[in-house]
């Protein structure tokens, strides 16, 4: 009997998240985190952003990005703790923290996006 | 160019020292000399007690892996002049128990290797008359992974193996892939359990140092990543398809 | 302490691994042990580059392979053995294919074959230019699928246990611990490879110290045709790393210092732009190496700090052919000579490469001692005669490895004899002697390396490509002196753990035996044949010497040389014609 | 009787390549931070113009510094991710360089599209 390991599932989420993050996060972070605050580019006005945000497509895309990015974090951070800080003995706790965190984060993301 | 160079060689003689100490030897610095030639000079003319492994001195037998100035290399294919003016620090391969001086214990790898079934698995019985056909293109699909000389530089470079000796490790997985990707082989299923266990591919975090260290261009990191994709695809299929359809 | 296995195979190279698999297949109930001083995949077979011969093409025939082998060996070949060899080589190579060996292929997926020196047809199977590497790893990995094949990795065999003409096992040292152990067996197969390290400049790895030859020799088995030492014409200066004959088979040229393809001056044919079989650069190794010496005498070689050289020219092949067929050659040249063969000439000189002689065996790998078998380079089944053809050795390891394995399995199945008290006494003696060896040499004053270097120089000067009665007699005297000096060799290393100095000492003592046997045989053979060229007897003399030399060890370390007729079945001795 | 070298917790400080690896792995923390930041932005936008402007003001102080660092890490993540991609997915008959270049083209195209949508 083959051992069913959840590892492939979390790895797939990690990979998808890594790809999504690599493709989308730099530009978003550059615009909203650096360029607008620094005034390199004029901040878009509220109405434009709100209309964008109200579009269901945007909501779905952003929700997907958040969930995947969070699982990407969860998986990678888990191993960073294992290896970088030699905490593999605390594996159970770390798994709870990481993937649990990602789940909770995803729920919050869903809530925030739905409400917005 | 100075005509000598200093080798700082890690010495460990069980029973004599509790842990390795460095001993310095001056050896001639010649254009053609590999680090191994320097060690041989020491062994032959200066200090017969220095122990290390070597054989082919042409980078193919995989005996002479050592840590030179911090990096895992084949000492027969690494040249003294590249480290001039020195000193050159020669230590045993990392991540393995040191038996003596520059000799490390690789029994862990030798025990893991058979577990991935690195041999051609076929169902046909008896053997066919002629060869199994294989086009040059099909040969190319696994050729890279068949170049492994079991030199252990990749294990020495891999931090995950350092931290978790249960990890199957780069070369063993690359060798499993060597057969999985061979068009003549039918044993991928038999290798699946070991490869996709927690100590198999999933333990690897794609540090990639194994491939950097590999002197034969095997790219074990790539082999592992590719298997992760395969294993994940399998897992999804297992999950989605009803039992009978698998 | 002692352990027991039905069969002990000494050596984990091509021959040893093949033998072990043969036993496991012949009789799964037998326990087989492979005892090897290095991990099997480190064995010297790993270095073989060019390929392995076995009739494959429709245009080829067993007869032609047989004729090439016999004439290549200057008619000192046992034709029944060679016949068995050419007949079984293709199926052995095919089995290796079934075990996964990544042979190079034709576009349609069938095995590709290439030309090789001294061969009339293309019949050399190859895996790019890492043939030996791929064969060895395939064999090793295949043995892993036989869990009943037990391995003693990094165990050094120091002697054979013999009682009343029958072998009962071996005594070996475990390197990691220095523990001496007796391994009792019904049969022993010696597959320890060659002895190139007896010479100063060789393609052979550090482990090729003729151990098995000396083991058998000391146990009372005769060595055969030891005077035939092959020089390969193209070794890299300084390192002695081999540039495979495949480089010439793919079209490489040998040029002297004037850029002239000098082989045309030595009855090896006329230059053609494309390689022609059995001609010029594709002549046999003995003739090519001898041509080099003549070029040197004429002052047409180039002097370097590492001796005279000529050039191997691959430039006209282009990067594409070189990368596809000879990638390892390019890698080795750039690593060890800092040159790129696509654009530059490769400096080469003849280098000691292969031992035609070895432990005398019959066609089943059996030696005159009951229960003792030998296969591979260590053995002399007499398929190579006075000169081995390139790419005949790897298949020899397979064919006769398998045969020896089968014969041993059969023998073990039928024998009832168990080792008597004498054997155990002998084992204890051997053990005690070895323990003494660890301590005896602590008083000495001669460095092992000095004696070894001198022995190598003596061999090169006395028994090189060209020899004569005088040079050989001098060599014999010098070797006797060296043996005396050996008794005063010193060992600094008192540790039991991985004591490579004691191993070097034991290897040196083996090499001295082998060196003496080579000189003894060479001294007695008053003719020139194949790789044995006597300037005082420049012609082949079939009347007196169409015979194998057979040398027995005498208690003082010397050799008693006798002769054994060559088995001729269908090809009477003829002229060796190349390029005509 | 073998000697096993102990491994320090901060093994990754002893070799440049290991250090770069740990930095790469740490990028995930900043990816997570981005999610937090994004959600705060979304919630601010959803709460009306004032909240949005308050958010804009807030994001010029220490948050800006954090975002600059995060951007660097995210870029490190993106570059290492794309560079390793051809090794992980081997597409038959497509040379690895092509896979690599396609990834970068996709990245560029998507970034421009996002910028266009936001700035329009
Ligand atoms: C550079 C090079 C290239 C070559 N290319 C070709 C080629 O292209 N084609 C071809 O046909 N032939 C080639 N040859 C020749 C061929 O490779 C060898 O003859 C052949 O591989 C010998 O195989 P073997 O199994 O007899 O011995 P090896 O592979 O040398 O194995 C010897 C084994 O014996 C063990 N051993 C030795 N002594 C002891 C001891 N005292 N105790 C325990 N174990 C011991 C060793 O550990 C090793 O495992 C080449 C040779 C060289 C040197
Ligand atoms: S994968 Fe490379 S580094 Fe690792 S053992 Fe094989 S050849 Fe050596
Ligand atoms: S270095 Fe180790 S973590 Fe993976 S990519 Fe190589 S095996
Ligand atoms: S001595 Fe064989 S690989 Fe270095």
Image (tube, coloured by chain):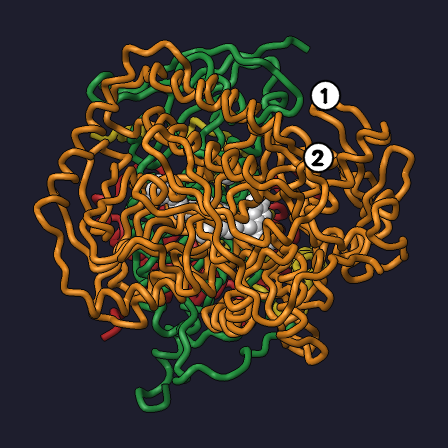
Q: Indicate the secondary structure of the residue bearing disc 2.
A: loop
Query: Circle 1 sits on which residue?
Result: C305
Give the colour of chain D. Answer: yellow
Tag 1 subunit: C
Q: Split into 4 quadrants, where in the image is the C terminus of chain B?
A: bottom left
- C535 up-or-down from B4: above or below: below
- C442 up-or-down from A108: above or below: above
Q: Which mark is residue B156?
A: none
Which chain appears green? Answer: B
Name the one closer to the observer, B246 or D44: B246
Q: Earlier in the sequence, mark 2 or mark 1?
A: 1
- Position of residue C189 measured from the top left corner of the image (x, y, whole percent): 33, 55
Query: Circle 2 sits on which residue?
Result: C535
Tag 2 subunit: C
Regarding residue B207, the answer to whether it shows in the image is no
Same chain for marks 2 and 1? yes
Quadrant of the rendered image containing residue C232: top right
Residue at 73%, 51% in the rendered image: C247
Residue at 24%, 71% in the rendered image: C28
Which chain appears orange? Answer: C
Question: In the image, D52: left or right of C207?
Answer: right
Quadrant of the rendered image containing residue B103: top left
For marks 2 and 1, give the one nearer the viewer: 2
Residue at 13%, 36% in the rendered image: C428
**Label 2, ligand 1: CB separation under 8 Å:** no
């Amino acid at each position: 009997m083959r051992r069913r390991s959840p590892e492939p599932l979390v790895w797939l989420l990690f990979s998808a998240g890594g790809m999504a993050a690599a493709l989308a996060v730099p530009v978003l972070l550059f615009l909203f985190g650096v360029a607008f605050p620094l005034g390199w580019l004029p901040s878009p006005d509220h109405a434009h952003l709100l209309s964008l945000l109200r579009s269901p497509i945007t909501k779905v895309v952003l929700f997907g990005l958040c969930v995947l990015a969070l699982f990407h974090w969860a998986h990678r951070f888990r191993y960073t703790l294992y290896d970088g800080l030699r905490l593999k003995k605390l594996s159970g706790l770390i798994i709870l923290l990481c993937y649990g965190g990602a789940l909770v984060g995803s729920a919050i993301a869903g809530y925030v996006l739905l409400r917005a | 160019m100075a005509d000598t160079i200093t080798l700082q060689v890690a010495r460990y003689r069980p029973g004599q020292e509790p842990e390795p100490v460095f001993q310095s030897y001056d050896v001639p610095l010649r254009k053609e000399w590999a680090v191994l030639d320097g060690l041989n000079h020491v062994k032959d003319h200066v200090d017969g007690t220095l122990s290390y492994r070597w054989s082919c001195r042409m980078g193919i037998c995989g005996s002479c892996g050592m840590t030179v100035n911090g990096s895992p290399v084949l000492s027969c294919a690494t040249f003294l002049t590249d480290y001039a003016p020195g000193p050159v620090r020669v230590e045993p391969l990392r991540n393995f128990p040191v038996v003596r001086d520059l000799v490390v214990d690789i029994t862990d790898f030798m025990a893991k290797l058979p577990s991935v079934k690195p041999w051609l698995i076929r169902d046909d019985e008896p053997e066919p008359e002629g060869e199994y056909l294989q086009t040059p293109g099909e040969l190319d699909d696994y050729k890279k992974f068949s170049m492994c000389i079991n030199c252990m530089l990749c294990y020495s470079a891999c931090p995950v193996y350092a931290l978790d000796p249960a990890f199957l490790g780069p070369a063993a997985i690359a060798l499993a892939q060597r057969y999985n990707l061979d068009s003549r082989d039918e044993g991928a299923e038999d290798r699946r359990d070991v490869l996709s266990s927690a100590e198999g591919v999933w333990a690897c975090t794609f540090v990639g140092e194994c491939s950097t260290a590999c002197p034969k261009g095997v790219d074990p990191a790539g082999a592992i990543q590719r298997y992760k994709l395969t294993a994940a695809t399998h897992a999804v299929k297992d999950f989605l398809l009803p039992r009978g359809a698998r | 302490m002692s352990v027991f296995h039905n069969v002990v195979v000494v050596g984990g190279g091509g021959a040893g691994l093949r033998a072990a698999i043969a036993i496991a297949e012949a009789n799964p109930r037998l326990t087989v042990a492979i005892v090897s001083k290095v991990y099997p995949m480190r064995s010297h077979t790993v270095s073989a580059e060019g390929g392995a011969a076995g009739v494959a093409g429709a245009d080829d025939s067993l007869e032609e392979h047989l004729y090439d082998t016999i004439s290549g060996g200057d008619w000192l070949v046992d034709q029944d053995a060679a016949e068995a060899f050419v007949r079984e080589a293709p199926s052995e190579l095919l089995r290796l294919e079934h075990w996964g060996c990544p042979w190079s292929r034709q576009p349609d997926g069938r095995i590709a074959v290439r030309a090789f020196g001294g061969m009339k047809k293309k019949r050399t199977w190859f895996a790019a230019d890492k043939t030996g590497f791929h064969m060895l790893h395939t064999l090793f990995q295949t043995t892993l699928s036989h869990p009943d094949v037990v391995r003693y990795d990094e165990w050094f065999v120091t002697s054979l246990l013999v009682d009343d003409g029958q072998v009962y096992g071996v005594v070996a040292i475990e390197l990691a611990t220095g523990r001496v152990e007796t391994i009792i067996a019904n049969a022993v197969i010696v597959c320890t490879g060659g002895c190139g390290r007896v010479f100063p400049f060789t393609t052979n790895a550090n482990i090729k110290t003729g151990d098995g030859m000396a083991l058998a020799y000391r146990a009372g088995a005769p060595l055969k045709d030891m005077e035939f030492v092959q020089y390969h014409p193209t070794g890299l200066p300084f390192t002695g790393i081999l540039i495979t004959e495949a480089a010439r088979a793919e079209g490489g040229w040998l040029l002297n210092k004037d850029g002239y393809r000098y082989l045309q001056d030595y009855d090896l044919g006329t230059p053609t732009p494309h390689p022609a079989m059995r001609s010029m650069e594709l002549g046999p190794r003995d003739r090519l190496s001898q041509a080099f010496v003549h070029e040197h005498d004429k002052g047409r070689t180039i002097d370097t700090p590492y001796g005279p050289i000529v050039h191997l020219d691959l430039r006209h092949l282009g990067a594409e052919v070189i990368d596809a067929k000879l990638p390892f050659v390019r890698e080795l040249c750039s690593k060890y000579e800092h040159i790129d063969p696509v654009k530059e000439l490769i400096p080469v000189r003849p280098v000691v490469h292969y031992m035609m002689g070895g432990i005398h065996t019959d066609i089943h790998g059996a030696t005159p001692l009951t229960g003792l078998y030998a296969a591979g380079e260590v053995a002399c089944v007499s398929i190579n005669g006075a000169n081995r053809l390139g790419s005949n050795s790897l298949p020899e390891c397979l064919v006769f490895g398998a045969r020896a394995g089968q014969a041993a399995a059969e023998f073990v199945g039928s024998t009832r004899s168990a080792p008597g008290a004498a054997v155990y006494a002998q084992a204890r003696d051997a053990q005690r002697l070895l323990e003494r060896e660890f301590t005896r040499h602590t008083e000495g004053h001669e460095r092992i390396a000095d004696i070894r270097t001198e022995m190598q120089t003596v061999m090169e000067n006395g028994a090189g490509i060209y020899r004569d009665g005088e040079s050989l007699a001098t060599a014999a005297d010098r070797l006797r002196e060296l043996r005396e000096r050996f008794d005063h060799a010193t060992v600094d290393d008192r540790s039991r753990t991985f004591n490579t100095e004691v191993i070097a000492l034991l290897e040196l003592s083996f090499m001295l035996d082998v060196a003496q046997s080579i000189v003894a045989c060479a001294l007695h053979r008053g003719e020139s044949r194949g790789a044995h060229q006597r300037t005082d007897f420049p012609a082949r003399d079939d009347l007196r010497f169409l015979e194998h030399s057979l040398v027995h060890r005498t208690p003082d370390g010397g050799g008693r040389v006798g002769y054994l007729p060559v088995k001729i079945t269908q090809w009477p001795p003829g002229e060796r014609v190349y390029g005509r | 009787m073998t000697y096993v070298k102990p491994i320090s917790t901060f093994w990754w400080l002893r070799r440049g390549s290991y250090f770069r690896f740990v930095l790469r792995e740490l990028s995930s923390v900043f990816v997570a931070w981005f999610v937090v930041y994004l959600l705060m932005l979304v919630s601010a936008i959803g709460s009306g113009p004032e909240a949005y402007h308050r958010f804009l003001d807030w994001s010029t102080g220490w948050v800006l510094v954090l975002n600059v660092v995060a951007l660097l890490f995210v870029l490190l993540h993106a570059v290492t991710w794309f560079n390793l991609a051809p090794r992980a997915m081997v597409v038959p008959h497509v040379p690895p360089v092509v896979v690599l270049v396609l990834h970068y083209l996709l990245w560029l195209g998507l970034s421009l599209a996002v910028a266009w949508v936001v700035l329009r």
